[in-house]
Image (cartoon, helix red, strand yellow):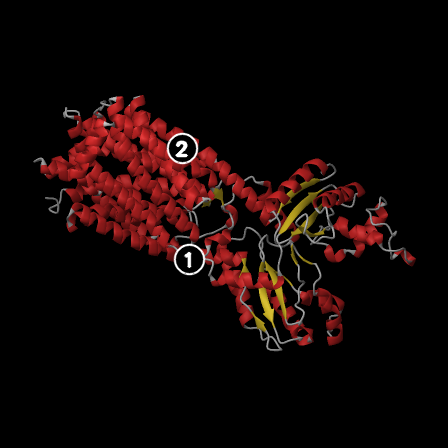
Amino acid sequence: MKIAHSLAKILVKRPKTVLIVYTIITIIIGSQIRNVYMQSDLTSFLPKDDPTLRLWNKINDEFQIGSTIIIYVEADDIRDPYVLQEMDRVTTKINTYELDKGKSDGVFSVNSIAQMIKEQNARPPLPMGLGGTGKYEIPKDSDLIITYLARLQASEGILFLNTYTVAVIIFQLSDNADYTQILNHVKATLAKEARYSTMTITGSIAMQQAMRDQNLRSLTIVFPLAALGVACVLFFFHRTLKGLLIGFMPLSYALLLTFGVLGTIQPELTILSIAVAALLLGLGVDYSIYLANRFAEECTLNDKIQRVECTLGRTGKAVFLCAFTTIIGFSSLMTSTLPPMVTFGFGCAIGIMFAFLSATILVPCLCLVLKFEKHETIHQWKRFAKILVENRKKFFAISCFFVVLSLLVLPQIKTDVNYYDMAPQGIPEVEKLLEYSRNFGTGANFNALYIETDSQGLTYPEVIEAIHTMEVQIRAAGGSAYSIADEIKKINDVLERSVIIEKIAEFIGVDTIILDKIAKKGLVDEQYSKTFILVSFPAGTSVGQLEQMIDKVNEIVQNTELPQNGYVSTLAGQDVVNVEINKQIMSSQATSLLIALLLVLACLIIGFNSIGIGILAITPVLVVLAWEPGALVMLDIPLSIINITVASIMIGTGIDYSIQTTQRVREEVAKGLSKTDAVRTTIETTGWSLVGAAATTCVALLSTFAVNIPSLHQFSIVVITLIGFSFIASLCVLPMLLTSRFIK
């Protein structure tokens, strides 16, 4: 109480000065918000030392699989000379310096049917039409084009479809390329040149940038909508502009401070950051509501210092405990092995800290400056409170019944980490990548099996046969596969070492197209001892099916004996990363959940100075967590990267309701009321504040439905549902517990 008294004196004597100083500090820190940027690469969800990533990096370092940009071309007939000339113009303008290997324009190489037809046409004339015209250009003769395409059947299904309505242009980028600059250049070129066909930029690089841009735009949509929703709820509960201002200003300061700090020390945001903005808008205003309502309740105290001291010393104590336990709930996410979970937990933790500081400092100042006095009694709510208290045993029994039902369906919870559900819907780059995957029979993600043998080992027929056999088995398991074995088997199904040596030399240092990827160093090293098998799975495949396919591929590898001391790695790549993240989701959830519960319980015991009351206060949260499986199964929502944080969020937010209710009951009992009357009074007063607090959070999260990201919608639905559960538990479970013999 001494701290509350000292702070009350400062706030009462210098409210305007405090407001000005706090505003200046907020502006200085908040200005760093311009540094934040969005990350959409799913590999960022795994630690850098994860074995899955280490293996992929090894393969990438060995063969330098470059990043690619794909232009998806659609036309009535891609054999039309005008369409091919258009593809050639686009290629030439993007790959300005064709022979510099990306040093000047960032484009290492280009592959397309237009390029290949030019090369065929540049061949010298030969008898029987086997050559070209000797001119390096797209011929205007349609018959010539058809002849050249007949020679390029090996590229069918890779660079064009046999329907001749779809083709692709594949740009391989150099390692030091400025992806953003190249993408912008490609977009500008397509806007000017695409006349006879429809050209859409796609590929993983284009998709990730589109997701980053869309997610940042989503923040600009979600934030004002959430703010508007919260403002409407505040106005509904207070019915005055003063109440709206007092509830909203501390929240605004807290958000500026939060993202200002993130911009300084943790500027890399993810899709979860959109949820952070909405979540803090909902949670941050709660503390202002609690303090403002208590200030209005203490209207009988004429001494302003005493009034502010009473507000901070009583409700402020509960708010501090709420904030501290909420910070613990979010901080528990920082124990996760998934980096974005750590970033999300950190962002929410400092956000709640600033929300508490802003509410504690600004609410009393604003109440004094604006002379906030209005406090209404809602008679309908008083009657509802009476019903809750009189029927508390029945409500408690019903709550326990649903706990049992929910726990019974726990094994039915699904986990999913579908990358495409995380992407905003309607983005052309994403839609065309899926279409590309369907039409060209390869997934958008790259996976590989690393192969190593003795020196010259890859020149032996038995090694090539073993590799080819693996590929056949992989295709039977549902994946696509490509390696040097395919190219060698095209020459002669009966392999001879001399033929293999002659053919394999072509793959060293040659820009060889591999579906939608290109190996800069070729498919084989100079010692003929290292290569890899490209493995791809259909885009949009569920994580459960992916896991089964990957396990099957790894099983094939384990059962393969490669001659010449051959070694084949387990599968590595983006799909493997997806599955690995999925595996870590449940363990990450369990660890952070246990840590959060134990730390919150310790804080409650210390804060209330009672083991019994601490256990009682956390019981409603345990009930809500027990209801969560039932909610997920009922709503048919899987645990994913996005909503895995929900349990820890619920510990942090749900405990607020228990703390506020328990603290107020203890105050009323200390005044001489019976436990039953104390609970009724608490629900009539503090309970109404809880309604406002829950409503603001739910309305803020509803704003996320303005952006078309399915996984974010699932997150909001689950959080809103569990916040509703937390509120119900505080009214249906706590009354029974707080009238027990543990409360003295």
Residue 461, position in %: x, y? 69, 75
- On screen, 506 above or below 299? below
Q: Which residue is mark 2?
A: 226
Of the residues shown, which amino acid type is indicated by label 2?
Ala
Q: Residue at x 41, y 41 (%)?
A: 275
- On screen, 13 above or below 390? above
> Of callouts 1 and 2, which one flags the residue occurring earlier in the amino acid sequence?
2
Say if residue 332 shows up in the picture: yes
Dividing the picture into quadrants, the one containing residue 199 is top right
Q: Which residue is mark 1?
A: 584
331 left or right of 265? left
Residue lying at the far bottom of the rendered structure: 564
Residue 41, position in %: x, y? 52, 50
Q: Nearer the viewer, residue 86 or 22?
A: 22
**Secondary structure of the residue carrying numbered label 1:** helix
Q: Label 2: how many residues lie within 10 Å, few (<14), some (14-19) or many (20+)?
A: many
Say if residue 384 shows up in the picture: no
Q: Residue at x 68, y 67 (%)?
A: 485
Tell me how far mark 1 sits from mark 2, CA to CA.
32 Å
Quadrant housing the N terminus: top left
